[in-house]
Image (cartoon, grey):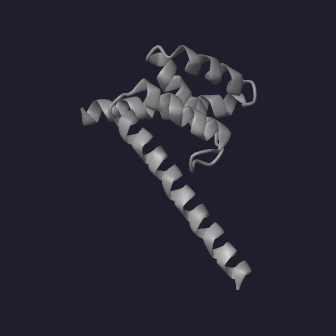
Amino acid sequence: MKIAFEQDFASACDTQSKIAADALVASCLAAAGDGDPGAYYDLGIAFSTGSHGASCDLVEAHKWFNLAAVDGHEEAAQCRADISDEMTAREIAEAQRRAREWLSASRRAA
């Protein structure tokens, strides 16, 4: 009986952690939609580390670091350079295409 309770409690904690992580990414995406370079950077961190409910995706991470760097976020520029060392030229090109697409879509929305 005690083991079942502990498993249920652990499962509930995992679910709450996932909900909180998803909410963090969602709030960063909302702020990114408003052009917040800090949110771009936070999304880059989430995707580069596979944390806060985001899967590890260096192409997405590069995209977000690139957007933050373009807005003058110096730490994002360094992070972008660091992960570029682990990416192929094709992956970097895809990340840059996604960043341009994001900028184009946000300009249309404004």
**57 left or right of 102?**
right
Query: The C terminus lies in which quarter of the figure?
Result: top left
**77 left or right of 20?**
right
Q: Is residue 79 visible?
A: yes
Outermost residue toward the bottom in this view: 1
Residue at the (65%, 67%) spot, across then down: 10
Residue at the (56%, 21%) spot, across then down: 76
Q: Is residue 94 visible?
A: no
Q: Nearer the viewer, residue 8 or 78?
A: 8
**Image quadrant of residue 8?**
bottom right
Outermost residue toward the left in this view: 110
Estimate the x, y position of residue 6 in percent, counting from the top left: 68, 73
Query: The N terminus lies in which quarter of the figure?
Result: bottom right
**54 left or right of 33?**
right
Estimate the x, y position of residue 103 in percent, counting from the top left: 39, 29
Estimate the x, y position of residue 41 in percent, counting from the top left: 52, 28
Residue at the (64%, 42%) spot, across then down: 57
Residue at the (47%, 17%) spot, across then down: 70
**85 left or right of 34?**
right
Determine whether 71 is above or below 53 in the image: above
Determine whether 33 is above or below 68 in the image: below
Estimate the x, y position of residue 30 in percent, counting from the top left: 36, 41
Q: Nearer the viewer, residue 57 or 108?
A: 57
- In the rendered picture of this protein, how many numbered marks are placed on residues? 0
Q: Nearer the viewer, residue 45 or 100?
A: 45
**Image quadrant of residue 31?**
top left
